[in-house]
Image: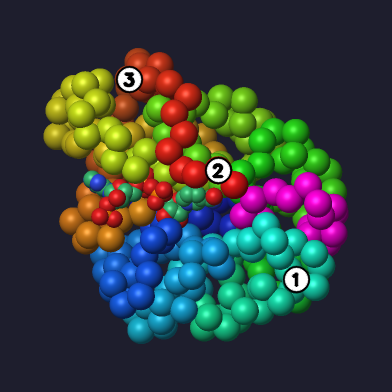
Amino acid sequence: MEYREIYGAKIPVIGLGTWDLRGKAGEKAVRSALEIGYRHIDTAEFYDNEEYVGRAIQESGIPREEIFLVTKVWYTHLRHGEVRRACEASLNKLRTDYVDLYLIHWPNQEVPLQETIQAMEELQKEGKIRFIGVSNFEVPLLEEARRLATLPIVTDQVEYHPYLSQKELVDYCKKHQVVLTAYSPLARGRFRHDQVLFRIGAKYGKSPNQVALRWLIQQDMVVAIPKAQSVQHQRENLDIFDFTLTPEEMEEIGRLDRGEKVASRL
Ligand SMILES: NC(=O)c1ccc[n+]([C@@H]2O[C@H](COP(=O)([O-])OP(=O)(O)OC[C@H]3O[C@@H](n4cnc5c(N)ncnc54)[C@H](OP(=O)(O)O)[C@@H]3O)[C@@H](O)[C@H]2O)c1
């Protein structure tokens, strides 16, 4: 595994996305991911699965400090008291005293950003959150969050994959030392028949999905959180550290952009 090390955080470049991994089957999927080496798990209060994620982590026997655990506060809970309540509820369900990263899941214009960030920073000072971040923030709002925060905004989690350029945000994140966490990094299965990813993958004995993940994590400041329920997919998504794309291949994949968003918007 490789890591992005920033502000004292050590973030594995591949994490397990857990949207839609619920119930016993979800718990089993998180458990198998931990068994095969995942040490970065992404969940959210909205996913309605924190309880199962928490149980899988506890029952794995892996020391809590070896796992980089991320959860998110939903956009209807961004008032000061609500952030605190939501965080406490997440910690209880996750069976832990702290999360490594706490994110604002989506911005909400009806709540002053300062109020939410202040609540998160209080939780951070109390040790319940190690780092804070945002999700689905475009550059101007990320800039505002950074200006309002007294502690670093460690990540912005957004949809990013070869079919969706995030050039402006990637450049901003590199310049200002913010980790860009790529969600839906496999465009939810749309790369299976991609000729370019297939041809490049054939050269290295890798699948189009593996090439897409490699392309993401080979970019400065980028990490990716593919979701996979099947252990075979989980393994495949970790098996991307034994090859390197050439600069020409990186560029060619960058040209696949077609502005395609696969995740639903609020
Ligand atoms: N912050 C946000 O607003 C936001 C929004 C969307 C997603 N997210 C996060 O990002 C995570 C990932 O995004 P996503 O779930 O939207 O989509 P994704 O990771 O792009 O794609 C997941 C799909 O790809 C399949 N898959 C995984 N690995 C594969 C492989 N090696 N070969 C073939 N198919 C494979 C999975 O199948 P199986 O599950 O059957 O193995 C699943 O159907 C989410 O789970 C969530 O944690 C965050």
Question: Which of pointers 2 and 3 indicates the residue nearer the eye?
Answer: 2
Query: Could one spot residue 56 in this view of the protein?
Result: yes
Residue at image location 40% in from the left, 16% down from the top: 255
Query: For residue 241, which quarter of the picture?
Result: top left
Work out how far the residue at label 2 is from the one at label 3, CA to CA, in angstroms: 31 Å
Helix, strand or loop at mark 3: helix
Task: Please say if 104 is above or below 86.
Answer: above
Residue 82 bears which disc, if any? Answer: 1
Residue 174 to residue 59: above or below? above
Is the Cβ of the residue at disc 2 closer than 8 Å to that at disc 3? no
**x, y percentage for residue 162?**
39, 29
Q: Is residue 182 magenta?
A: no
Q: Mark 3 belongs to which amino acid?
A: Glu
**Quarter occupied by residue 117:** bottom right
Please give the range of residues in magenta.
Answer: 104-118
Task: Residue at 78%, 47% (x, y): give it.
Answer: 109
Label 1 amino acid? Glu
- Tell me which numbered mark, 2 or 1, is placed earlier along the sequence: 1
Q: Residue at x 20, y 29 (%)?
A: 193
> As rendered, which of 248 and 226 lies closer to the eye?
226
| Colouring of the image | rainbow
Of tags 2 and 1, the one toward the viewer is: 2
Q: How many neighbours does mark 1 have within 10 angstroms: few (below 14), some (14-19), or many (20 or more)? A: some
Percent position of residue 264, x then y = 49, 44
Residue 265 is tagged as 2
- How many other residues sit within 10 Å of disc 3, few (<14), some (14-19) or many (≥20)? some
Q: Is residue 112 magenta?
A: yes
Disc nearest the viewer among 1 and 3: 1
Q: Nearer the viewer, residue 121 or 7?
A: 121
